[in-house]
Amino acid sequence: MHLLYLDDAGAADTKSEEYLVLGGVSVFEAQTAYFTNELDKIAAGFSSNSPEDVEFHASEIFARREAPWNNLNKAEAQGVLKAVLGVLAKSYDSAKAFACAVHKASYPNRDPLQLAFEDLCSRFDRYLSRLHASGDRQRGMIVLDESSHETTLQGMAQNFRKLGTQWGVIRNLAETPLFVNSKASRLVQLADHVAYAVFRRYNASDTQYFDVIASRFDAHESVLHGLAHKQTKDPNCMCPACLSRRFASGGANR
């Protein structure tokens, strides 16, 4: 089974932030131990006796207000963020990043998290369909951090399987999303870093974290399918997601 771990960055009701991002990483179930072990190695540098007690939460590392991150200078904190993302960058070729960045003002009548979730469900389903066509018949499951949106997102996923999204029926997910405590899942923590890297790229024009994982977003036939930039403010946006779609044959807008 392919597992898509997702977390969000930014907040729907925070006016000082232009974007909300939902993002994460898809891994084959047998690969989860590798990611956990690699992230535990980084955590051991901050708590050698109990690395499992160190939770990698990107915004907390960036802010450096809470232990153990409050003992780091800015460059050291940036190094931790990049080291966590580097685990994905250096991992299996089959591990893919997915993210949807929603420009909130472009969709004043939509919940940006729900918009991003619908988008990523469709993208993950199409990714699984491509794998199925190549002989990989594994199905998928989405795993998210526990949140107040749990009931809403589970209901949305059930409806997608029955009624479809605006891009078609979801056919390759084995079950409704699973919600877990991020402290208990290194993969959810990695998803948090992917979402934060994309958030920094779009909300603050800070590409240093995004650049670490830019090559890991799902791509097919020159289109960056794993990264979506939902916005209506700039038809000539030069970000990688928008550029790849404009240059694709047929001018696809997805």
Image (cartoon, helix red, strand yellow):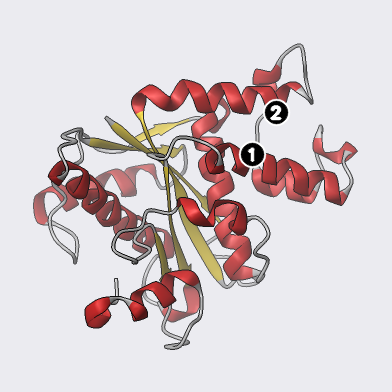
**Distance from label 1 to label 2 (Cα)?**
8 Å
Quadrant assignment, res 76: top right
Between 60 and 87, the one lying in front of the other is 87
Q: Give the mark, 1 or 2, whose residue is nearer the N terminus.
A: 2
Between 74 and 37, the one lying in front of the other is 37
Q: Image point 23% across, 49% down: which residue?
A: 125
Q: Image point 64% across, 23% down: which residue?
A: 40
Q: In this view, does 239 lie to the left or right of 74?
A: left
Q: Image point 50% across, 30% down: which residue?
A: 181
Residue 226, compared with residue 251, is above or below; it is: above
Residue 10 visible in rendering? no
Residue topped by disc 2: 42
Quadrant including the N terminus: top left
Q: In this view, does 34 lie to the left or right of 144?
A: right
Residue 99 spot, x, y in % from top left: 44, 56
Q: Image point 76% across, 11% down: which residue?
A: 49
Question: What is the residue that sits farthest to the left in this orientation?
Answer: 162
Residue topped by disc 1: 84
Quadrant assignment, res 229: bottom left
Q: Dot 1: within a 10 Å radius of its alpha carbon, few (fewer than 14), some, or many (20 or more) residues? A: many
Residue 136 spot, x, y in % from top left: 19, 36
Q: Check disc 2 and report its element: helix, strand or loop.
A: helix
Residue 135, compared with residue 38, is above or below; it is: below
Task: Give the residue type at disc 2.
Answer: Ile
Q: Dot 2: within a 10 Å radius of its alpha carbon, few (fewer than 14), some, or many (20 or more) residues? A: some
Residue 84 visible in rendering? yes
Residue 95 spot, x, y in % from top left: 41, 40
Tell me if label 1 and label 2 are in contact, CB under 8 Å: yes
Quadrant assignment, res 71: top right
Residue 232 spot, x, y in % from top left: 41, 84
Quadrant including the C terminus: bottom left
